[in-house]
Image: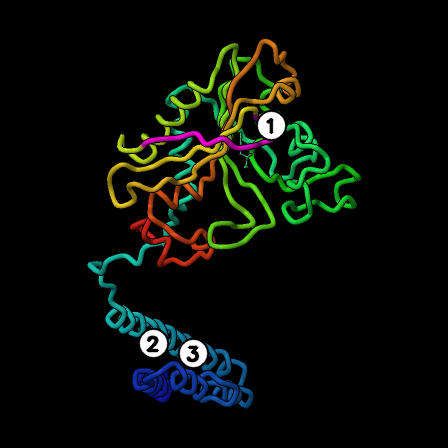
Amino acid sequence: MSSNLEALVQDAAQQFAEAADPASLENAKARFLGKSGALTALLKGLASLSADDKRAEGARINQAKVQIENLLTERRQAMADERLQARLAQETIDVTLPGRGRGVGGVHPVIRTWQRVEEIFRSIGFDVADGPEIETDWFNFSALNNPENHPARSMQDTFYVDMKDSGGLPLVLRTHTSPMQVRHARTHQPPIKVIAPGRTYRVDSDATHSPMFHQVEGLWIDEHISFAHLKGVYTNFLRCFFETDDLVVRFRPSFFPFTEPSAEIDMMFTSGPNRGRWLEISGSGQVHPTVVANFGLDPERYIGFAFGSGLERLTMLRYGVDDLRQFYEGDLRFLRQFNQRL
Ligand code: PHE
C-alpha cells in the first residue's frame, strides 16, 4: 500500500476517533467513503492508468477501503457501548425501594354480610339458592298470593320491563327475594331448607332506601315446621351475625300476602352502644297455604316459615353506618374502613 493510502487510513482512524457523537462520525465517514469522499476520488483516478497498474492500484485502494470500513464499524460499536454504559450508570435501579404494589380490590361491606349470612345458615344445614333478578310477574307477585290490584304492583314501587323487550311476557326487576321461595320449592322435595340472597329493586331512594338493594330470603318447609323453629333459627342467626348473646328478638304482627300469620322481626341489643332500642330487621311469617300449593305441595301436609331480611340493614347495624347511600357512592374513604388493603 502506498504511503499515500496509509496516510489516508491513519487520517480516517484519527477523524473517527475524534468524532464525539454519531452525527460527526457519519460526517467523517462521508469524507472518506462517501460519493465525493477521498477513496471514491482515488478510484475514479484509476481510469487513466494502464490495465496492469489499474489492477494493482485498485487492489490497494480496496484494501485501504476495507480497513477504513472496519475502523468505522469499530468506532460505531465503541460509541454504542459508551452510550449504553453511560445510561446504565445513570439509570441505576434501587432494588431496595418498596414495590409500588397493585391496587388490590376489597370485599364490599354488603357482600361481606352476604358471605357471613351464607356461612351461618350453611352451618345449620340450609342450602343456598340463586335466581334471576329479572323475574316474571307470576313468580314475583301472583305465585306469592299477591292480588292483581295489590299496591306492591303499582308503578311507584316496581321497575317493569318494557313488554316490547320481553316478548309480551310481563317481567319486572324482582322487588324482593321471595320469588326464590317458589322457584326453589317447585324444583326440590321437602324438607326444603334454603336461603336465597341476592339483589332486589324498587322505585325508592332516600337515606334508608336505594333503588337497588339486597335481601336474603329464608325458607324452611317440612311436615311440622312452626313459628318456634323460626324464632330459634332467627335468634341464633342474629346472635352469630352480631357476635353477641346480648340481644333479644320480638315478633310484631304484620301483613304479607304470602304468609299467614305474618310478623316483623325486631331485635334489641341489651348491651353496647345501641342497647335498649327496638330495631326492625326482617319480614317473616308462616308460609300461606295458597303459596304452599303454588310450590306444588299439599298445604294439608306441608307447613313452614319464610323470612326476608335486608342485607344493607344488617350491615348498617353491624358497622354503625347511618346512611345506606354510602354503600353505593364508591367513596374509597368510606370503603377503606372495611378493607385495610384498599
Ligand atoms: N318479601 C318481603 C319484603 O320484601 C319480606 C318477607 C319475606 C316477608 C318472607 C315474609 C316472608 O318485604
Q: Which residue is mark 2?
A: 75
Q: Quadrant of ligand 1?
A: top right
Dominant secondary structure, magenta:
strand
- Residue 99 location in percent, x, y? 27, 57
Label 2 or label 3, whichever lies nearer to me, is 2
Q: Give the class, few, some or many, for how many residues have Cα within 10 Å of label 3's Cα (few <14, many ≥20).
A: some
Q: Which mark is residue 13?
A: none
Give the CA distance from mark 1 to mark 3: 101 Å
Q: Which residue is mark 3?
A: 65
Q: For the view shown, which residue lies furthest in the left direction? A: 96
- Residue 91 location in percent, x, y? 27, 69
Of the residues shown, which amino acid type is indicated by label 2?
A: Arg
**Foreground residue, 298 or 75?**
298
Q: Which residue is mark 1?
A: 258
Mark 1 falls on what kind of element? Answer: loop
Of the residues shown, which amino acid type is indicated by label 1?
A: Phe
Of the residues shown, which amino acid type is indicated by label 3?
A: Lys
Give the CA distance from mark 2 to mark 3: 15 Å
Marks 2 & 1, CB-CB < 8 Å contact: no
- Identified at 37% across, 35% down, the residue is 267
In the image, residue 273 sits, relative to residue 257, either above or below, namely below
Marks 2 & 3, CB-CB < 8 Å contact: no
Label 1 or label 3, whichever lies nearer to me, is 1
Residue 42 appearing in the image:
yes
In the image, which residues are magenta? 248-259
> Which circle's residue, 2 or 1, is located before the other in the chain?
2
Is the C-beta of the residue carrying label 1 under 8 Å from the nearest atom of ligand 1?
yes
Quadrant assignment for the N terminus: bottom left
> Which circle's residue, 1 or 3, is located before the other in the chain?
3
- Identified at 46% across, 32% down, the residue is 252
Marks 1 & 3, CB-CB < 8 Å contact: no
